[in-house]
Amino acid sequence: MSSKVKFSPIMRLGEAEYMTHLNGKELLRLWLDDVIQYFPEIQRGTKVKLDKDKNEIEVPVFSMTNVKKITESMLKGNYFTDLITLNVIKDGTEKVEVKDDSLIIHSGKIAISDGQHRIRALESIKMSNDTMETAFDLESLVFPIKITIYDIPTAQQQFYQFSQGLKISSSRAEYFNSKDWANILVKRLMEKGRALHERVEIVKNTISKRDTKHIVSFATLVNALNMVYVVDNEEELDKLIEYLDEFFKELINFISELQDYDKRLESKEHSLIGENFMFYGYVAISQILSSVPDWREKMPLILQLDFRKDSKLWYGKITKRGENKGYSIIRRAMINRINKEFTDLLFQSNKES
C-alpha cells in the first residue's frame, strides 16, 4: 500500500477490531487501486491456470458462478448488503492510528478476509456500466465493514470460522484450523526442510493429474491422523512430529512414485501406491512401526503389499470406481485392512529373522 487510507466514522469493537461502512463505489475503488488485495494465505488459496501463451500462472480461487449470482441480485435490486471483513496484516510493517473518529492506516497490507465474491460482483457491474450495458449506481449499496488487525495465523483462524458456512474444500478449511493437534502437526511437517515441504495440497481435497508437486491433501492427512493417533499433550505432539517427519522422509525416499511425477501418473492407472487416499494406509503403517525399535529396516515391507487396484483385496470392499473413472475409498476399511496386511508381513519378517 503506497499511501495512507482513512476509514471514517469508525467504531471500536475490541483491541484489534473496528467497524465502519463504505458504499460500493468506494469499496471497489480500494480494490481496483490495489489498496485492498487478495492474500492467498488467509483466503481460498490459488490454483494453477494456463494463460494465452500456455504458461502456468497462479490465480485466486473463487467461484465465477457465485459472482454472477451476486451480480444479478444486485442489478435486480434484490441484494441485501451484508458484512465485509478486511484485515490489516500484522507483520511489523503496519502503522495504524486511531484519531478522533477515524482509523488511519499509514502503511501496511490490507487483505480481503471475507467478501471477495461481492467485490468481484461490484467490479463486474462497473465493467457493464462502462460499456453502457447497465447504469447501476454502485453508491446505492452501502456495506458494513469490519476491519481487523491480525497476524497471518489469527486471520487464518478467522477465515476458518467463515468457512464453516462456505462451499470450500475440507483441505482449505482444515488448513486454517490452527487449534487442533492434527492440523498443527501437518503444518509443522510442511515447514521448509521437513519431509512434506511443498508436497501437501492445501486448497483441494484431491490431487489433479496435472499436479506435479503434491502427493497428498491436507484434509487426507488430518483425517488419517485423527483416525489413527491419540495425542494428549504438547510433549506427545512434539515427539510425534519428529517421528513422522523421519517416517515420511523414509517413505518418500524408497517409493519412487512419491518422488517422480511421471512414475506416479503412470502408476495411478493400475496401482494405489501413489494415490492421495493411500496415505490413510501409510499413516496406519506409521502407527504400527512407531513401537518397533528398528522401524526403518522394516519400511521396505510396504512394497510387499498388494497395491493393484483390481485386486480382490481392495476392489468392491474398500475401493470403488466412481462415475468419472476415479476411485473412492472407505477410509476406516482402508486403515483396518492395511493394519492387518502389514502386521502379517511384519510378523512373518520377525519370524524369519
Image: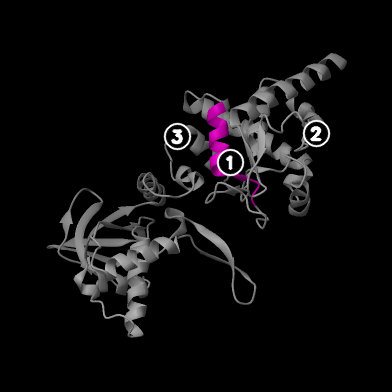
Q: Earlier in the sequence, mark 1 or mark 3?
A: 3
Closer mark to the observer between disc 3 and disc 2: 2
The quarter of the image holding the N terminus is bottom left
Q: Are discs 3 and 2 less than 8 Å apart at CB?
A: no
Queried whether the magenta region covers residue 206, the answer comes back as no
Kind of residue at badge 2: Leu
Which residue is at the front of the view, 70 or 226?
A: 70
Determine the secondary structure under disc 1: helix
Q: Which residue is mark 1?
A: 189
Kind of residue at badge 1: Leu
Q: Position of residue 272 (x, y in %)?
A: 73, 39
Closer mark to the observer between disc 1 and disc 2: 2
Q: Which residue is mark 2?
A: 303
Q: Which residues are magenta?
A: 214-227
C-alpha distance separating marks 3 and 2: 32 Å
Kind of residue at badge 3: Asp
Up the image or down, 77 lies above or below 308; here it is below
Q: Which residue is mark 3?
A: 180
Badge 2 density bin: few <14, some 14–19, many ≥20, Cα 10 Å:
few
Q: Is residue 226 left or right of residue 291?
A: left
Q: Which mark is residue 280?
A: none
Residue 293 appears anywhere in the view: no
Q: Position of residue 65 (x, y in %)?
A: 43, 62
C-alpha distance separating marks 1 and 3: 15 Å
Q: Position of residue 6 (x, y in %)?
A: 22, 68
Q: Earlier in the sequence, mark 1 or mark 2?
A: 1
Which residue is at the front of the view, 16 or 225?
A: 225
Q: Residue furthest left?
A: 100
Q: Earlier in the sequence, mark 3 or mark 2?
A: 3
Badge 3 density bin: few <14, some 14–19, many ≥20, Cα 10 Å:
few
Which residue is at the front of the view, 40 or 135?
A: 135
Up the image or down, 29 lies above or below 293; here it is below
